Image: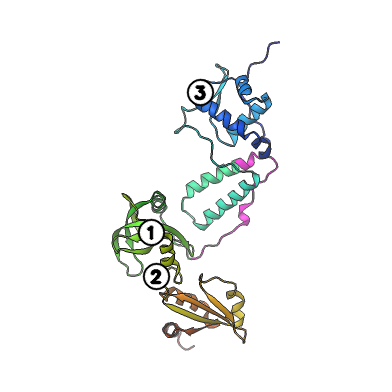
């Protein structure tokens, strides 16, 4: 009986990632063969060029199809394999990153975290990534898909951002381009149109902010992404501010408010509340000490006191503001205002 002609491959369970990855050099070589040819190549010729057995050849082709999404097609009439370029938007290239089973599980968990950290943002793209990762895991024998529902992130006071605006902002940031935005500021309820040079996207307290150079004000500013009403990428390249200057401007003071820290808040927390606060990180340059009576003293540099005031008030009677005097007065004013809401207490 004559030698049987090459048959189209049937999909079978792939061997473990480690075994197949031993043939990485052959995968790259076969990819180059398919990429450079315009006609199908027989299975026998593939074996000769890769210097491998038929079983290894089949395993490599299946791996490339199922794990690397290579468009390998078998042409029965011409008894050969080739890349199907006719139904692809771009010429196929091998992915730059390959993962073993444990890395895939970790990546799938990270994808779940990303989806929960910023619900709605890039939801379709994240869902596609999740689908592909789950498929890769299914093709790995003996490896179970992690139950990502065992990981939970609870967002608090999250403000919904427009997906399209977020994507346009991120694209301009990575491309190094200026943006023209229409912005509705919460601080003064005013609308403005301005050109900005994006510097950094910041996730802060469950919401997105864009640190940028404002060409209207000629200053570094921070913009809440959810308050950007419209956005357009401009042709001009963004002005790039040195990282150390950004750090000095945005990280020196407390919270989201930028600028150099001009004041130092000294707070004494009760011994009971100190069990939590002593393990918290409020500011990179905070200082702390335990007092003789068991209380915990925390010193924090700040510029604008508004956000710090809110964080102080949430601790109620468990914290005392020692200094500065104007911060003490601000706390007293809030207490008086609350007494007017709840009289007779």
* Circles 3 and 1: CB atoms closer than 8 Å: no
Mark 3 or 1: the one toward you: 1
Q: Point out the tag, 3 or 2, that comes first from the N-terminus.
A: 3
Of residues 99 and 32, the one drawn nearer to the viewer in this rendering: 32
- Residue 241 is labelled as 1
Q: Which residues are magenta?
A: 136-156
244 relative to 216 in the view: left or right:
right
- Which residue corresponds to mark 3? 37
Extreme residue in the top direction? 1
Q: Residue at x 33, y 57 (%)?
A: 196
Q: Residues within 10 Å of mark 2 (few under 14, many from 20)?
A: some
What's the distance in space between the residues labelled 1 and 2, CA to CA?
15 Å
Pinpoint residue 199: horizontal percent, then vertical percent.
40, 57
58 versus 127 height, above or below: above
- Which residue corresponds to mark 2? 259
Q: Point out the tag, 3 or 1, that comes first from the N-terminus.
A: 3
197 relative to 111 in the view: left or right:
left
Pinpoint residue 340: horizontal percent, then vertical percent.
42, 85
94 relative to 175 in the view: left or right:
right
Q: Point out the tag, 1 or 2, that comes first from the N-terminus.
A: 1
Pinpoint residue 174: horizontal percent, then vertical percent.
42, 50
Specify whether residue 152 is painted magenta. yes
53 versus 213 height, above or below: above
Q: Residue at x 34, y 65 (%)?
A: 185
Q: Secondary structure at mark 3?
A: loop
What's the distance in space between the residues labelled 3 and 2, CA to CA?
60 Å
Q: Secondary structure at mark 2?
A: loop
**Quadrant in the picture for residue 50:** top right
């Amino acid at each position: 009986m004559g030698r049987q002609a090459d048959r189209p491959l049937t999909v079978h369970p792939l061997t473990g990632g480690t075994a197949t990855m031993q043939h990485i050099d052959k995968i790259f070589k076969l990819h180059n063969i398919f990429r450079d040819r315009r006609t199908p190549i027989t299975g026998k010729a593939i074996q000769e060029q890769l210097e491998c057995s038929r079983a290894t050849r089949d395993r490599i082709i299946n791996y490339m199809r199922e794990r690397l999404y290579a468009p390998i097609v078998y042409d029965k009439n011409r008894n050969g394999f080739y890349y199907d370029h006719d139904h692809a938007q771009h010429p196929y290239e091998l992915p730059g990153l390959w993962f073993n089973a444990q890395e895939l599980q970790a990546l799938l968990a990270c994808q779940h975290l990303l989806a929960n950290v910023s619900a709605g943002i890039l939801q379709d793209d994240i869902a596609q990534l999740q689908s592909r990762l789950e498929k890769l895991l299914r093709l790995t024998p003996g490896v179970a898909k992690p139950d990502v529902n065992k990981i939970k992130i609870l967002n608090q006071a999250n403000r919904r951002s427009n997906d399209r605006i977020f994507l346009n902002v991120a694209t301009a940031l990575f491309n190094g381009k200026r943006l023209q935005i229409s912005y509705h500021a919460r601080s003064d309820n005013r609308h403005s149109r301005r050109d900005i040079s994006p510097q950094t996207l910041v996730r802060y307290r469950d919401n997105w902010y864009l640190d940028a150079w404002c060409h209207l004000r000629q200053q570094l500013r921070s913009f809440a992404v959810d308050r950007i009403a419209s956005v357009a990428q401009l042709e001009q390249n963004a002005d790039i501010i040195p990282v150390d200057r950004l750090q000095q401007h945005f990280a020196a003071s407390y919270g989201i408010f930028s600028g150099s820290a001009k004041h130092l808040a000294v707070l004494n927390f009760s011994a009971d509340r100190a069990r939590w606060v002593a393990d918290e990180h409020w500011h990179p340059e905070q200082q702390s000490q335990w007092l003789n009576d068991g209380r915990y003293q925390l010193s924090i540099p700040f510029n604008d006191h508004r956000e710090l005031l809110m964080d102080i008030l949430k601790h109620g009677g468990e914290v005392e503001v020692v200094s500065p005097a104007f911060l003490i007065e601000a706390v007293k004013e809030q207490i008086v205002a609350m007494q007017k809401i709840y009289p007779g207490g």
